[in-house]
Image (spheres, rainbow, N blue to C red):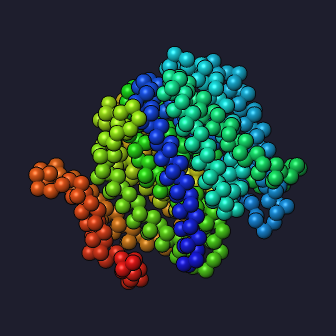
Amino acid sequence: MKDKLKQLFSDSIIYGLFFILGRFLTFLLTPLYTNYLSIVEFADISNLFSYIAFLNIFYAIGFDSAFFRFYDKSNPDYSKKVFFNSWISIFLVSVILTLILFLNYNNFANYICDSENSKEIILYALFIPFFDVISYVPFLYLRINNKAKQFSILKIVIIFVTIILTYVFVVNYKLGAMGVVYSHLIGAILAFLLTFNLILKNLKFNFDFIILKDMLKYSLPTIPAQLSGIMLNLGDKPLVKELASNEDLAIYNANYRLGLPMMLLVLAFDYAWKPFYLNNFNEPKSKELFARILTYLTIISSIVFLSVSFFIKEIVNLPFMGGKLINPIYWSGLDIVPIILAGYFFNGVYNNLSAGINIMKQTKYLSYSIIIAALYNLTSNFIFIPIWGYRVAAWNTLISYMISAFVIYYNGQKVYPISYEWKRVLIIISSCLITYIGFNLLVNIINVELFININFLKIIFIFIFIFLLYIFKFFEKSEIDLLRRLLKR
């Protein structure tokens, strides 16, 4: 088990470093957006990229999941067929869908954007998802072959170029939302160019209709789940725009982005987790290993939740390009940040619990869990956003992720039962909530700043969380011994 954990840990560190650096670079766009774009332009960009995310699902036709399941490193010829059938199918679908949208973009441009140059913005934005998805398969190839370093370097280069171009177009050339679209389109084209050699290397030019049929049979049922997943992550933003206002959407999106640390943790884990469990589910004690991983994911997530929630005001007040890290006009929405952090955590729980479903190829259950959650999210947002505004969208996102995790667990136990360490997980969550609520009660009821430095108090409460785990007898003897050895170093 230790060797397998080391493998997952090693890949997670590499992907984690990539995501930390990559998403941090991407996060630098937030102060740029909030300080240099108007509220309408920021709302338009938020709305536009939500739609692009939906398009990417249709363009990829679920082959990102199928590629992992059918690629066989022990059979190079078969794997090249899987690569070719995946890539050429995505390419042809993307060409057709892009052409359809190009011929009709005048009809929906004003619906998506309120900027004066909305038609020009949409015209160029149409080609972003096309170039995005035709580089999907090469990046999946790098992941399945454990080439985490190469994957990360290429992605960082693409992100870095996109960030630099965004700064130049928005700050220097003052192109507004149009500059954001230009930079992301160039970044998507660069991704294709950087992976073109991998495409040529792995293409075996013949259709294998048996492989294609099997992959479609596996992939198509995952599309509703992926669409619903995008709806959970991004679908609330168009609804906030339509049911509330551009200002609400801008405030909501600016503060939603502050959930970045938990999102990084969940994404880094998921990138390493999927190939890990698919490569190791036949190993002895694999189920015990999978259960322990959920426990450790929960404790790490709790520390991230407390750290970000406690220090959020200090974070947004940091000086940055054009002003503060987040423009003060958006600070009224800071109270949704802990809700977003919790939502991302339950998304990570869902990813962990879905392992058995993918191992047993019962992908229909992925659809069930996400569709149920997405329907709740969509219905609740339609009903309550007009009444309570963007804050209810944050709560609905959290509840939706909880629903999806519960449903996937219920169905997963039918096909691949795992004895998760639920008692230990509940101890972690309870200790985290006690710490969070206790700190806020203390700060709000008593003016503690008269007696102690508030930031020092925040650090103390994070250690109180660890102490509560000890009091509630969370740690096993082997874990206590390990902690003692680490502290002695």
Spot occupied by residue 9 in the image (x, y as percentages of width and height): 54, 68
Closest to the observer, 183 or 330: 183
| Residue located 74% across and 60% down the image | 71
Q: In the rendered view, does 66 fall on the left or right side of 398?
A: right
Location of residue 325 with respect to 150 vertically, above or below? above
Q: How many marks?
A: 0
Give the quarter of the image for residue 318. top left
Q: In the rendered view, does 274 fall on the left or right side of 470?
A: right
Q: Quadrant of the N terminus?
A: bottom right
| Residue located 67% across and 60% down the image | 147
| Residue located 41% across and 70% down the image | 422
Spot occupied by residue 264 in the image (x, y as percentages of width and height): 48, 53
Q: In the rendered view, does 149 fall on the left or right side of 39?
A: right
| Residue located 70% across and 62% down the image | 145
Q: Is residue 177 among the parts visible in the rendering?
A: no
Find the residue positioned furthest to the top. Answer: 116
Location of residue 71 with respect to 382 vertically, above or below? below
Closest to the observer, 444 or 180: 180
Give the quarter of the image for residue 465. bottom left
Closest to the observer, 28 or 286: 28
